Amino acid sequence: DAKTTQPTSMDCAEGRAANLPCNHSTISGNEYVYWYRQIHSQGPQYIIHGLKNNETNEMASLIITEDRKSSTLILPHATLRDTAVYYCIVRVGGATNKLIFGTGTLLAVQP
Amino acid sequence: GAVVSQHPSRVICKSGTSVKIECRSLDFQATTMFWYRQFPKKSLMLMATSNEGSKATYEQGVEKDKFLINHASLTLSTLTVTSAHPEDSSFYICSAREWTSYEQYFGPGTRLTVT
């Protein structure tokens, strides 16, 4: 299983863009990069995923480097409600498609 | 759409008793459901994968006789913590994989406290 490395914590000012990095240097060619977040005492919430192209949805943008060894999740205008632990996950292939969570990044959005 | 519920949201039980937690996919069918546990300030740890109509697959180190999983229908999986002890106190979270896609949707979690 490809492993991911994320900073333990980050701060961001409210209204500014939050850029969360993730390293996944051992990713395989057919493995996707997924991002979830978990607000305290809640279940994880899906944010976005991608294979090799950059992706954007109503929540965030995902930038994947050309060699696919790292990616960045961008929250364009962070709000206090975006304070959460953000998990970058490389999806295991196969029929069960397990999601294995790493330690994640605690993003604290400051007023 | 893609809502997963868990019941109960919180439960307190006495040591030695068994507790059942339900996970339901409300608006989609899930051939596969996953069970996680999470200790305070820690990440989610995958416990087992349950497939509708077959036995669950447990991750290494998870006792299958202690954590009984049943996935009897395409919308319901249950986790029973048998003979619970205080060290089983944790946040239990399920996820359900929609049968036509790879996407997983998570439930809100169940806080178990064993006294």
Image (spheres, rainbow, N blue to C red):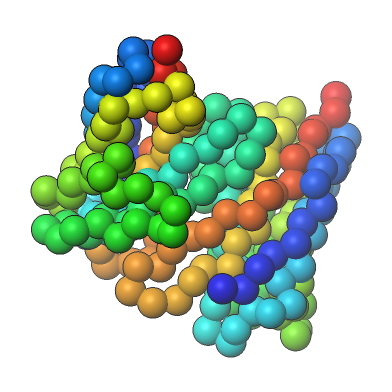
Q: Position of residue A16 (x, y in %)?
A: 85, 41
Residue at 41% across, 58% down: B59
Q: Is residue A80 visible?
A: yes
Answer above or below: position of A92 versus B111. below
Answer above or below: position of A47 versus B14. below
Whether residue A70 sits left or right of residue B50 in the image: it is right
Image mark count? 0
Q: Determine the image quadrant of residue B83.
A: top left
Residue at 18% across, 49% down: B71
Q: Position of residue A22 (x, y in %)?
A: 75, 62
Q: Determine the image quadrant of residue B79.
A: top left
Residue at 30% across, 41% down: B67
Quadrant containing the N terminus of chain B is top left
Q: Determine the image quadrant of residue A93.
A: bottom left
Answer above or below: position of B16 versus A36. above
Whether residue A9 sits left or right of residue B15 in the image: it is right
